[in-house]
Amino acid sequence: MTPSSDSGAWRKAWAVFVKDITSEFRTRYALSAVLLFAVTALAVVSFSVSPYSLEPDAQSAFLWTVLFFSAMTGLARSFVREEESRTVLALRLSAAPDDVYLGKLMFNAALQGAVALVVVPLFLVLMDITPVAPGVLAASAALGTLALAASSTIVAAIVSKAKSKGALFAVLAFPISVPGLASAVRSTTVALRGAGGAGTAVAVGVAGAAARTTGVAVARSASAMAAARGDLLALTAYSVLMIAASLLLFDFVWNE
Amino acid sequence: MRHLAESAVAKWALGIWMVLVITGAFFYAPAAAVLGEMSRIIYFHIPSAWVSVLAFLMCTVYSVAYLRRRREMFDAAASFAAELGLLFCIIATVSGSIFAKSAWGSYWNWDPRETSIFVLLLIYGAYFALRSSVDDPARRGSLSAVYGVLAFITVPLLVFVVPRLPAVQSLHPDGPIISSGGSLDMDSKMFTVFMASLAGFTGIYAWAFNLRLRAWRIINEED
């Protein structure tokens, strides 16, 4: 821990983030591997369920399954790469643990965000879904991405010091990510279906078809936002909790 | 020597206490109105679940102690607490599953409590998977301690918050331990046996934990 000022700490964390982005753009290992994995998983899901029309809660569960396992293939790289290329020592000497953690967190969030940016629209297209509340969907995807990055960055740091890194990462990250994932799945369901149960969604849909005005769509979107508000708040709180805990604990992993 | 005599007395007292609890659970406490004889599961299932969470708390306490003091004993104690927690977690899961079959018709139906205990099982499993994949004792100690603390932060969310959410439907009755209103709708006889069982299970945990730790000390400190 360095007694540096706030702006200084952020500058260093930003430097770690930029370093990771630069080295990622040189190899494009993580991004290409993760994106290909995500698209493959999405194709498998879409192909195997294409004969059926799914309920919104099943669709949202599939979407988050794809996003979770994409995260599991890519996010461990952030620390494993440092171990493999033997740059850990240099990084440890040149930056304080908090800065390293925040930089890696930003990198993981950016990587997972890029994956979500490709996967979510592709998912909507392949599964032929028109979300009732696109704003809620975007908010769930963004906050869920942050939550996944928050819970898996510290686990990536732990795993990089252990043997059998790949298999261990998903095993360790899943139980910790469950509260965040559960909230993300629920709020995504609301975004796809609208507020209330399946029955009201049909009723609202009929009313919307009859009225055909943008006012109704706005009202539906607003009521979905109200219904998903608790889950989105829970997601935010969970991310903050995980990041705060990781900042406290990261020192012990990093200097091990 | 005096220490040994004391522990022998405590051991026998615990044995007699548990005999009384088991007898009381079947013969002293009345059966509940709706569930009938099946309700007697609460004297064994809930205390096991309680011990599995308590053991997890102890694992976290010892993990924090290890991270602060770096003494090998704390790491060993954390892993013993996790071992016992895993055992009681399995007991709670299996007994609850059998109860679910006879009360709700299927062994497993992803009720929120079932989900949370399943995740607790996964956490224990992940904890031991992590321990077995690190060779260096000091590194194993700090990595598993960090993971234990991290997982402990998510357990309250799963055990106490998620099953309480109004949006989540649960088959579980409002438990006497984590009832939202704090009211107990139990017969006084049932309540006595239940509390005695909680104390007894906690005692069994403390006894088994102590036994493991003493064995560890003999192997590691007196050679």
Image: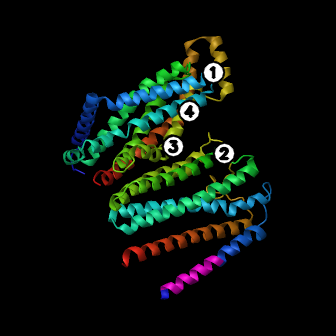
* Mark 2 neighbour class, 10 Å CA radius: few under 14, some 14 to 19, many 20 or more: some
**Is the residue A126 above or below the residue B96 in the image?**
above
**Distance (Cα) linking label 1 and label 4:** 18 Å
| Residue B5 forms part of the magenta stretch | yes
Report the residue at 66% width, 45% height from top. Answer: B170
Report helix, strand or loop for mark 1.
loop
Residue closer to the observer: B223 or B69: B223
Residue A239 lies in quadrant: top left
- Asked if both marks, 2 and 4, belong to the same chain, the answer given is no
Amino acid at pointer 4: Ala
For disc 2, the marked residue is: B170
Q: What segment is highlighted magenta in the picture? A: B3-15
Report helix, strand or loop for mark 2.
loop
Amino acid at pointer 2: Ser
For disc 3, the marked residue is: A179
**Distance (Cα) linking label 1 and label 2:** 32 Å
**Is the residue B155 above or below the residue A73 in the image?**
below
Residue B197 lies in quadrant: bottom right
Query: Of tags 3 and 4, which is closer to the observer?
Result: 4
- Asked if both marks, 3 and 2, belong to the same chain, the answer given is no
Residue B158 image offset from top left, x and y in percent: 54, 48
Residue B51 image offset from top left, x and y in percent: 57, 63
* Mark 1 neighbour class, 10 Å CA radius: few under 14, some 14 to 19, many 20 or more: few
N-terminal of the two: label 1 or label 4?
1
Report helix, strand or loop for mark 3.
helix
Report the predominant secondary structure element of the magenta stretch.
helix
